[in-house]
């Protein structure tokens, strides 16, 4: 059984990279545009990524932040991140006796039980809905339909199936959104980088159409800007803890010759590596140009060969299985945002820009900027019209994923389509 899950996850990655993404509803541009009419709204990319992953997995989109599944997911996820945070639970691995502390004295046990209930209600609720939809013959080609149809052949019981969907929602929701929030923060705080990226995209794409993934090959500066966003504020600063199955000799420079004992827990301090001033010039600043100078952005003359572009996605056999979906999603969203919008800091009463704190980040195993204020405006009326047009043209694609919406969601969707 254990080998089946990685196989299906790998298949998911490839399927998502090659086929599914173009069929998934693009980000709702009208919601992005409305931010410009409310320049003081705190920014969040979370509903979009959550909607993408729910559409891919369960064939069900989440049009609003307040959509039931999105709210339920973020409630469970925040609890989950809190219990995973180093120090949130006592060192049970080292002192197994702690397992027997009665629940009434162990807050961490109550926290874990609450998190488990929130997660299971969501995962198994979505799975049941998908199964019922399949039973009614209303397939829309989502990933969990395929899993449910071949559940027996794959040898997957209900428990494994529910958690397969669950771990993918978890992995796919606030990671991509965290990246996009950092991107917006960096574009706002570093206007020169934003301008360079806009100039490049204008040269390659122009103003009469939106970018496509094929454009990325010609967008050298934007590719560097994406790598710099990962370096500047990696989504999982310490990755996810790994354990060694056998004693191993370390192979990276600085640790060569050291033996890591069997069963050791390893945190990979990606943030520390990316902010090491021996490796990177001026690591505390957002400088995409560093990735134009050397392959891994390291200072010229420094050996950066131990690094690689996908380091923020993990190491070894537990490397992120959603990497292809994530990269496609990041690439298209980054191009779209840079093509479409001007990001600038909010101003105070005297019209002076309010400085942004690019170090104010949430705590947890995954991290994202604390809510910040900025002004987001379409770069021109022509671009705004094109986005609206694309949004309306995507109506049929969206509709396939709009089953089981609440009355409020249906009203929101109808209103957004009426805004011609
Ligand atoms: C910006 C986007 C993303 C980043 C930076 C990211 C990063 C990571 C990292 C660092 C890990 C832990 C790997 C390790 O410790 O070695 C991980 C695991 C994982 N990711 Fe992602 N991820 C992203 C998007 C996604 C997406 C879109 C999906 C789902 C479609 C996904 C699904 C998963 C899953 C299921 C795991 C757990 C794998 C395991 O435990 O074997 N991730 N991701």
Image: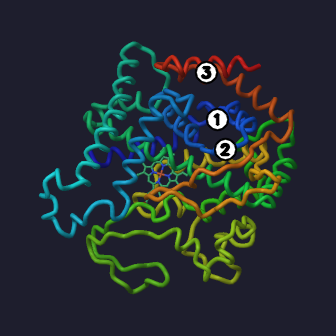
Q: Residue furthest top?
A: 136
Quarter that holds the C terminus: top right
Residue nearer the viewer, 76 or 149: 76
Q: Which residue is mark 2?
A: 333
Residue nearer the viewer, 278 or 114: 114
**Nearer to us: label 1 or label 3:** 3
60 versus 250 height, above or below = above
78 versus 385 height, above or below = below
Quarter that holds the N terminus: top left
Disc with the residue nearer the chain's start (1 vs 2): 1
Residue nearer the viewer, 198 or 292: 198
Give the secondary structure at mark 2.
Answer: helix
Q: Position of residue 76 (x, y in %)?
A: 38, 42
Q: Position of residue 384 (x, y in %)?
A: 80, 33
Among the 4 quarters of the image, the one containing residue 168: top left
**Number of marks in the image?**
3
Q: Which residue is mark 1?
A: 27
Disc with the residue nearer the chain's start (2 vs 3): 2
Alpha carbons under labels 1 and 2: distance apart: 8 Å
- Pointer 1 local density, CA inside 10 Å: few below 14, some 14–19, many at least 20: many
**Mark 1 CB in 8 Å range of ligand 1?**
no
Mark carried by residue 201: none
**Mark 3 CB in 8 Å range of ligand 1?**
no
Q: Is residue 45 left or right of residue 2?
A: right
301 versus 165 height, above or below = below
- Pointer 2 local density, CA inside 10 Å: few below 14, some 14–19, many at least 20: some
Q: Residue furthest bottom?
A: 257
Residue at position x 76%, y 46% from top? 215
Q: Which residue is mark 3?
A: 413
Give the secondary structure at mark 1.
Answer: loop
Disc with the residue nearer the chain's start (1 vs 3): 1
């Amino acid at each position: 059984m254990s080998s089946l899950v990685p196989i299906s996850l790998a298949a998911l990655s490839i399927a998502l990279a090659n086929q599914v993404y173009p069929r998934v509803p693009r980000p709702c541009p009208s919601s992005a545009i409305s931010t410009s009419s409310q320049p003081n709204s705190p920014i969040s990319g979370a509903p979009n990524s959550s909607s993408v992953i729910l559409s891919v997995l369960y064939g069900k989109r989440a049009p609003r932040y307040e959509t039931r599944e999105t709210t339920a997911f973020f409630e469970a996820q925040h609890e989950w991140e809190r219990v995973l945070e180093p120090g949130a639970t006592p060192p049970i691995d080292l002192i197994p006796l702690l397992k027997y502390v009665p629940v009434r004295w162990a807050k961490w046990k109550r926290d874990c039980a609450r998190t488990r209930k929130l997660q299971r209600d969501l995962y198994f609720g979505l799975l049941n809905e998908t199964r019922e939809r399949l039973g009614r013959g209303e397939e829309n080609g989502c990933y969990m339909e395929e899993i449910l149809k071949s559940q027996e052949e794959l040898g997957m019981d209900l428990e494994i199936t529910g958690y397969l969907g669950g771990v993918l929602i978890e992995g796919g929701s606030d990671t991509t959104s965290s990246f996009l929030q950092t991107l917006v923060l960096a574009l706002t705080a570093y206007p020169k980088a934003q301008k360079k990226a806009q100039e490049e995209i204008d040269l390659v794409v122009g103003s009469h159409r939106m970018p496509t993934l094929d454009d990325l090959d010609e967008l050298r500066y934007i590719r560097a800007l994406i790598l710099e966003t990962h370096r500047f504020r990696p989504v999982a600063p310490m990755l996810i803890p790994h354990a060694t199955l056998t004693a191993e000799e370390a192979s990276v420079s600085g640790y060569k010759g050291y033996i890591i004992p069997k069963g050791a827990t390893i945190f990979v301090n990606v943030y520390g590596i990316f902010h090491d001033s021996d490796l990177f010039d001026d690591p505390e600043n957002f400088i995409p140009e560093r990735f134009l100078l050397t392959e891994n952005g390291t200072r010229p003359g420094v050996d950066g060969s131990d690094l690689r572009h996908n380091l923020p996605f993990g190491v070894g056999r537990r490397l992120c299985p959603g990497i292809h979906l994530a990269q496609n999603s990041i690439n298209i969203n980054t191009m779209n945002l840079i093509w479409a919008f001007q990001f600038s800091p909010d101003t105070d009463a005297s019209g002076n820009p309010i400085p942004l704190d690019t170090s104010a980040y949430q705590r947890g195993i995954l991290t994202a900027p604390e809510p910040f204020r900025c002004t987001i405006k379409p770069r021109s009326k022509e671009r705004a019209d094109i986005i609206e047009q694309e949004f309306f043209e995507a109506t049929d694609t969206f509709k396939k994923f709009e089953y089981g919406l609440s009355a409020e969601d249906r009203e929101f969707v109808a209103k957004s389509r009426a805004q011609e």
